[in-house]
Image (cartoon, grey):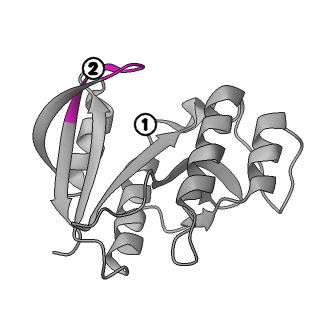
Amino acid sequence: MHDSLRLLPAEDAHFDWMIEEASPRYGLSLPPGGIHPADVLTLLRNVTASVRTAQRPGMYLIVDADEVVGLCGFLRPPTDAGEVEIGYGIAGARQGRGFATSAVRLLLDEAALDAGVQIIVAGTAVNNPASQRVLEKNGFDRCGEGHDEDDGPTYRWMRAARR
């Protein structure tokens, strides 16, 4: 695990900054090429606004030292059955360094603090073995298949919130 890695609740101002790919702000910098394209960041901002509650910010900046290396978070509020879905992404310039695995571990710690969360689910593209390994390393089991209009064929993953 990356000792300096932390999750910082993502605010609207952070999304503005990342979309603009502006110079360092908030004591943070962006990697070369930024985090995600502007349209993806706008979508994630909207997801964050729909999920944000007093108990959960929705999306988090994944910060290593003072650099934002990616985003992760909860894609929807918990269902009545206590199921919540997570998502994560690492900047292209920072992939392959274990940041996603460590960030998901921290996100699972956050989810475990909410007594209403019992099950955590995630989805990966069938052709994304790196993302599949992230979930396997964090104790997820593959539980089904699906289809996403952007990613095509997908695998569904699940694990208990507390182990």
Q: Residue at x 36, y 73 (%)?
A: 109
- Name the image quarter holding residue 94: top right
Tell me residue 130's x, y (percent).
31, 33
Badge 2 element = loop
Residue 87 against residue 153 in the figure, above or below: below
Tell me residue 137's x, y (percent).
22, 52
- Residue, disc 2: 127
Comparing marks 1 and 2, which lies closer to the viewer?
2
User: In terms of depth relative to the viewer, which is nearer, 163 or 97?
Assistant: 163
CA gap between label 1 and label 2 equals 16 Å
Can you tell which mark lies on residue 46? none
Is the stretch drawn in magenta largely helix, strand or loop? strand
Amino acid type of disc 1? Gly
139 sits to left or right of 36:
left
- Residue, disc 1: 96
Is 65 a magenta residue? no
Number of marks: 2
Tell me residue 13's x, y (percent).
81, 55
User: In terms of depth relative to the viewer, which is nearer, 152 or 52?
Assistant: 52
Residue 27 against residue 34 in the figure, above or below: below
Badge 1 element = loop
Residue 16 against residue 64 in the figure, above or below: above
Determine contact: label 1, label 2, CB under 8 Å: no
